[in-house]
């Protein structure tokens, strides 16, 4: 069982998937910071100072130590923008990779040198045809 587990973990696909998940998590944090720290303040300025994270519909007001109950649709809008930017970034990255693969596939393959034995046999054949 240990050998099977080691073989499973050391397969290329599993390692590639793990690396992708880790990089994707870090990429998500960077994009979330980009949205909340750069884009949303700019959008706030353009909309006349509206801070999206403060937009909410209060269902029950806070009373004493009991906190309010609210639908925070501003945070939802921020998360939608966050998702759209992540999706656009991934789309652009995959488009770039596919164009690089296409260019690589379009390169003409170099013609391999013929095997010396086959070349010698071809010469013999051609000489036999002449005679």
Image (spheres, rainbow, N blue to C red):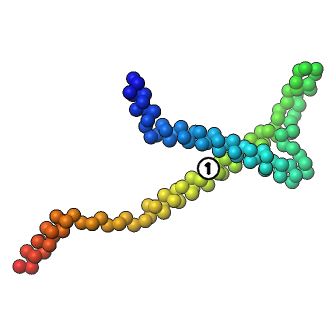
Does residue 2 lie above or below 116 as drawn? above
The extreme left residue here reads 131
Does residue 87 lie above or below 127 as drawn? above
Taking the spot 87% from the left edge, 39% from the top edge, the residue there is 54
Left of 118 or right of it: where is 8?
A: right
Instruction: Pinpoint residue 3: horizontal percent, then vertical percent.
Output: 38, 27
Q: In front here: 22 or 80?
A: 22
Where does label 1 land, which residue? 90
Taking the spot 67% from the left edge, 47% from the top edge, the residue there is 86
Residue 82 falls in image quadrant = top right
Q: Is residue 80 visible?
A: no
Left of 101 or right of it: where is 56?
A: right
Q: In front here: 25 or 64?
A: 25
Left of 106 or right of it: where is 80?
A: right
Image quarter of the N terminus: top left
Tag count? 1
Residue 4 falls in image quadrant = top left
Instruction: Pinpoint residue 125: horizontal percent, then vertical percent.
Output: 11, 71
Q: In front here: 108 or 80?
A: 108
Instruction: Pinpoint residue 70: horizontal percent, then vertical percent.
Output: 85, 30
Q: Is residue 75 visible?
A: yes
């Amino acid at each position: 069982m240990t050998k099977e587990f080691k073989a499973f973990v050391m397969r290329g696909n599993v390692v590639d998937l793990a690396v992708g998940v880790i990089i994707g998590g870090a990429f998500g944090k960077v994009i979330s910071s980009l949205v909340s720290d750069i884009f949303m303040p700019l959008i706030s300025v353009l909309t006349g100072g509206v801070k999206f994270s403060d937009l909410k519909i209060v269902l029950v007001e806070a009373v004493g130590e009991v906190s309010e109950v609210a639908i925070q649709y501003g945070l939802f809008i921020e998360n939608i923008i966050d998702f759209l930017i992540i999706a656009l970034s991934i789309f652009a990255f995959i488009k770039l990779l596919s164009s690089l693969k296409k260019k690589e596939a379009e390169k003409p393959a170099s013609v391999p040198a013929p095997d010396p034995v086959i070349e010698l046999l071809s010469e013999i054949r051609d000489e036999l045809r002449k005679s």
